[in-house]
Amino acid sequence: MKQDVSLSGWFFTPTDNRFVGMFEPAKKRPDLSISVLRDSAVALSSPGNFLKCLFFIMILSVGSGGLPRVVFSDENQDVVFERSELTILTATSSHHFRIELADTMAARMRGLMERRHLDDDAGMLFDYSKPMQIHMWMKNTFIPLDMLFINKSGRIVRIVANTTPFSTDVIASPGPVLAVLELNGGTAARLAIKTGDKVIHDIFSSP
């Protein structure tokens, strides 16, 4: 799978007095062991290197509108999800959910992996920007989920209920869709959510 290349943080390498961006390949980044952190602290304790660090942070702050987020990670990089809300209109009612929006490659790849809990009124909306054939799986996912495949107008075109945790079986959309909504397993049955029901959120166009 292809992953977005984005700047998620910087760290200082005392061996060559340089700053390394997190977009560099993992094999080129030093391991952030206790010894590396200790050496970094020693290197930055000298007035010259400390001023370099302070000046560098000031430059990033001006360019980004605030202090940069420093993320020490490797393959399992930290991912930030925007929070939002959506409504599902069924034949008899409307149901509101607090969701996290996965609208970048890194966020979609992470999804709900490693989560141990999901509130009854919570979920994750995978936004693919344009309709396409979507393939999902449950690798490293602890929570049984209902997956709702949604077209560009917000209509649910397929529901896969109670997916199996950790399964690597492919779960495919029935055709091009714009988004996938993941909810706690059993939610669709509990709330009588069916194919053809309407999902209301800013990413979907009006019918």
Image: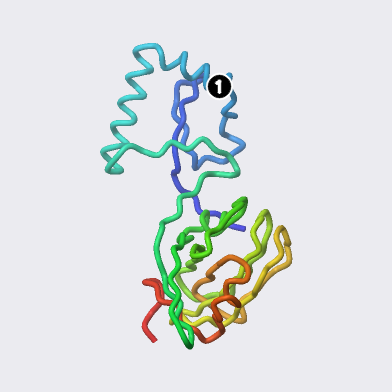
Quarter assignment of residue 65: top left
Q: Which residue is drawn at 45% across and 50% down?
A: 80
Give the amino acid type for the residue marked by disc 1 in the picture.
Val
User: What is the tally of numbered marks visible in this picture?
Assistant: 1
- Residue closest to the far top: 46
Instruction: Check disc 1: other Cα within 10 Å, few if <14, some if 14-19, many if 20+.
Output: some
Q: Which of 19 and 149 is in front in this view?
A: 149
Instruction: Give the image location of residue 183, x and y in percent.
Output: 56, 67
Instruction: Give the image location of residue 43, x and y in percent.
Output: 45, 15
Q: Which of 165 and 44 is in front in this view?
A: 165
Q: In this view, does 3 lie to the left or right of 53?
A: right
Quarter assignment of residue 46: top left
Q: In this view, does 190 lie to the left or right of 80?
A: right
Question: Which quadrant of the figure contains the C terminus?
Answer: bottom left
Q: Residue at x 40, y 39 (%)?
A: 69
Instruction: Residue under label 1, please give it.
Output: 36
Above or below, 128 relative to 66: below
Instruction: Give the image location of residue 193, x and y in percent.
Output: 54, 80
Q: Which residue is drawn at 58% across and 54% down?
A: 117
Q: Nearer the viewer, residue 111 or 12?
A: 111
Instruction: Give the image location of residue 122, x and y in percent.
Output: 49, 62
Above or below, 152 relative to 96: below
Secondary structure under tag 1 reads: helix
Question: Which quadrant of the figure contains the N terminus?
Answer: bottom right
Q: Which residue is drawn at 62% across and 71% down?
A: 186
Above or below, 188 relative to 25: below
